[in-house]
Image (cartoon, rainbow, N blue to C red):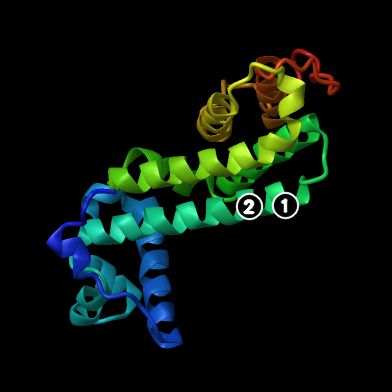
Amino acid sequence: MKAKSKKAASRRAPVQERSQLTVEAILDTVIKLLKRRGASSITTNRIAEAAGVSIGSLYQYFPNKRAIFVALHERHIAQVDRIMERRMAESAESTLEELISSLIDGMIEAHATDPELSALLQAEVPHRADGTRDFSVRLHGAFRKALAPHAREFGSRTDLDMRAFFVSNMIDALGHAIVLRRPSGSSLSRARAELLRAILAYLGQNGSSPLPGLGVS
């Protein structure tokens, strides 16, 4: 992992409950401002005023606007981590198809709860590239562990690391896409079923779940 900049390193971590509540209030305020005006119009003064805190208090936790945006991404990634960990735990004894289906549903859940925010975080809000890489590495490791009990179904020459790499990235990227950018007129359930079929085909499984009929909205 790359070293953090001096400004990022100076960010004060909230320890006491009151401090944590202040940080959460600031981040919630930023989300409201993002939805109203977009990232380019946000300033630290505007954030402090809308959150009802002094600019000095804001700077105690966030040395600049970019640090706030990084914190927003980190909070979102932590939420995705929790959802996917829960899905994997719930699917520990499931079939491969049930596992993949649950993981797809987990990624959809993570972004369908607030699709407007997910779209803003992806398109408008700057973040640390190494934060995204850290998440990708964790996701790959978790998927490898989840797929390992099903390795025999992939064949004796299967590279489990490669399978986990492709499956985790397919679910991450396409889970975003079917919530935020699926074709007009295509239902979420149909897009989900298409993604499930694509991943099962990649894993050499035919799958037993029928696709919704054409034209379903």
Q: Quadrant of residue 189?
A: top right
Q: Badge 1 local density, few (<14 within 10 Å), some, or many (20+)?
A: few
> Which amino acid type corresponds to the residue marked 1 in the rendered image?
Ala
Residue 105's disc is none
Mark 1–mark 2 distance (CA, rounded to whole Å): 6 Å
> Which amino acid type corresponds to the residue marked 2 in the rendered image?
Glu
Image quadrant containing the C terminus:
top right
Residue 17 pos. (x, y %): 45, 85
Asked if residue 124 is positioned above or below residue 30 in the image, the reply reads above
Q: Is residue 125 visible?
A: no
Residue 47 pos. (x, y %): 27, 67
Residue 88 pos. (x, y %): 69, 47
- Front position in the image: 216 or 140: 140
The residue tagged 2 is 85
Name the residue: 40% across, 52% down: 35
- Front position in the image: 136 or 214: 136
Secondary structure beneath disc 2? helix
Asked if residue 8 is positioned above or below residue 115 in the image, the reply reads below
Tell me, yes or no, whether the two marked residues, 1 and 2, touch with CB atoms within 8 Å. yes
Residue 67 pos. (x, y %): 25, 60
The answer to whether 31 appears left or right of 67 in the picture is: right
Name the residue: 84% across, 23% down: 209
Name the residue: 54% across, 50% down: 114
Q: Is residue 40 visible?
A: yes
Secondary structure beneath disc 1? helix
Name the residue: 37% across, 41% down: 133
Residue 89's disc is 1
Q: Badge 2 local density, few (<14 within 10 Å), some, or many (20+)?
A: some
- Front position in the image: 36 or 69: 69
Identify the residue at the far front of this view: 156
The answer to whether 194 appears left or right of 43 in the picture is: right
- Front position in the image: 126 or 102: 102
